[in-house]
Image (cartoon, rainbow, N blue to C red):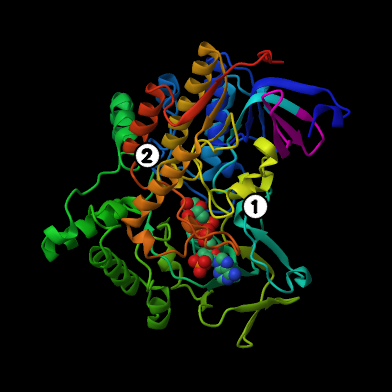
Amino acid sequence: MQSKDHDVAIKYFDAIVVGAGLAGVCAAYQLRRSGISARILEAGGGVGGTWYHNRYPGARCDIESLDYSYSFSDELQQEWHWSERYASQPEILRYINHVVDRFDLRRDIQLNTRVTQASFDEAQERWVLVTDAGEVFAARYAIMATGVLSVTQVPSMKGLEDFKGEWFHTGDWPSQGVDVRGKRVGVIGTGSSATQLIPLVAEEAAHLYVFQRTANYTMPAQNHPTKPEVEKEWKQHYPDRRRFAWASGFGHNQVTNHLSGKEMTPEACLAELENRWRLGGLYMMRAFKDILTDAEVNDVAAEYVRGKIRAIVRDKETAEALCPRDLYIGTKRLCSGTNYYETFNRDNVTLVNVKNKPIDCVTGSGIQLVDGRSYELDVLIFATGFDAMTGAMTKINPLGRNGLSLREAWAEGPKTYLGLCMTGFPNMFVITGPGSPSVFSNMVTSIEQHVEWIVACIAYMKQHGFSLIEPTLHAQEEWTQHVTQMAGKTLYAKSRNSWFHGANIPGKPVVFMPYVGGVGNYYKKITQVADNGYEGFRLSAASATPEFSGH
Ligand code: NA7
């Protein structure tokens, strides 16, 4: 893909950022601050990425918003008020738009622009990116802020094209909303999106059928309006809070119990679990230091949650069907919702267990299972997840050195150095890529750590006259092995059926993708790599190619 192939003017920048979600917006801010010219290309009609597209009712963050927010400007964190403990999608979207306007970033962002091709021009030492409108951009650096949960997965289902009602995916929800009042609605899936959506749809629908294949664990979010004293305390101590998050295991301020479940008496375990249930949401995952490494300890927590489900759901058969089995708690991502289990006590809600009798097809009027049972529906909602962590990258399928495609390079699973860069793809950076803490952390912390590192790297290269940076094959292989070894010490090694492993996408290699070694340890590692002159990378001196300056 050379410029002469295109009868269009090429637009040159130091860096092209693909995506204007939380990562792309953070990159826009930091690149501007460092005097690196950049254009941010965003496929959506607005900024926000995940928070732009996931507009389904009940969409909400499961990390507390005081934590799930940028730390790069103290003015910003002091002036912004989060109305609830866990912000809803509209509030997060307002926040991202506020950041864009407050720092005048909109002029660097080009909306409604999907990057369809990216290839490395070796002679010119630059990335050439082509958009769906045929525009061509060239830049020394390509920064992929394409998101980790941005490519929706609608399972292939016979007959979907014949369905006379309307159907939607939670991750691609219409901006005008969906009117389910008085309608018969089906929801396929019982992951995080479904558990947030189901209670709200149930309040409006004539009848709601929930098609569940795998029961997952759902914690009560325990959401509430932000308490003024909590906000005041955070704002007084924001620098300490952020430092703590950056050095912590998961990139936030949730308190971890540092005791093993085995060191505690059954009474103490129960008290801890009760406390975690009261704290709500993902706090359960920090109940014991070994909850994700010791099967017996994990089962204590799992059994506790099963007990809660049995206590909440009145119909015994439904309660048992909602109880997760053969699933370590947390190995499919823990869900956090409000009134999820309570919703199954409503007369207009039916749980349809499709584990052993799966959906056979969609008919003109609804859903039919393999045993012949059928359900008449007006609206069908797919809460069926995403091609997580790698989908957006392999969809663009960048071509690196010698035409090496990313799909080829990742045929056996994603391989990266530090989750940031790939051998054969010089000067390409991935924000929160596979092999970094990413989805296993507070995404905003991980995004900020990556953006800080990438922008400092580009500045270093400019300062020292380097034009190319690329990980050595050895460093990449070692890191990829390390990521797998770390996961091997956890229960994820025994439970390989989640999107963390790519197992939800037919044909995708089953490999655990995020780095579980802890956000703080990871940050130390990438800082050390940079401090040691980018250990594990090959840096090459600038050729005759002139530096680009912004347009
Ligand atoms: P998830 O967590 O991937 O959940 C998808 C759900 O859809 C899950 O319950 C799946 O069951 C179910 N599913 C997928 N395909 C089918 C078919 N063919 N039949 C029945 N059920 C199906 O996606 P979410 O959007 O909820 O959450 C993604 C992340 O976003 C979440 O983890 C947070 O990090 C934010 P399965 O478990 O595969 O049996």
Q: Give the residue at mark 2.
A: 226
Q: Secondary structure at mark 2?
A: loop
Report x, y in % for residue 56: 58, 53
Q: Determine which quarter of the picture holds residue 31.
A: top right
- Please tell me whether residue 176 is drawn above or below residue 291 in the rendered image: above
Q: Position of residue 27 (x, y in %)?
A: 55, 27
Name which residue type carries label 1. Answer: Trp
Please rate how many residues cluster around mark 2, counting C-alpha atoms within 10 Å: few if below 14, some from 14 to 19, many from 20.
some
Which of the pair 116/336 is nearer the observer?
116
Residue at image coords 52%, 28%: 26
The answer to whether 311 appears left or right of 91 in the picture is left
Q: Amino acid at mark 2?
A: Thr
Name above or below for residue 451 compared with residue 205: above
Q: Residue at x 51, y 38 (%)?
A: 92
Residue beneath disc 1: 173
- Asked if ligand 1 lies within 8 A of label 2, the reply is no
In the image, taking residue 551 as reference, residue 284 lies left or right, namely: left
Q: Give the image location of residue 409, x and y in percent.
A: 59, 47
Q: Position of residue 382 (x, y in %)?
A: 61, 63
Q: Is residue 189 visible?
A: no
Horizontal side of 239 relative to 338 (left or right) equals left
What's drawn in magenta, residue-wise? Answer: 110-136
In the rendered structure, which disc, 1 or 2, sits on the residue that comes first in sequence? 1
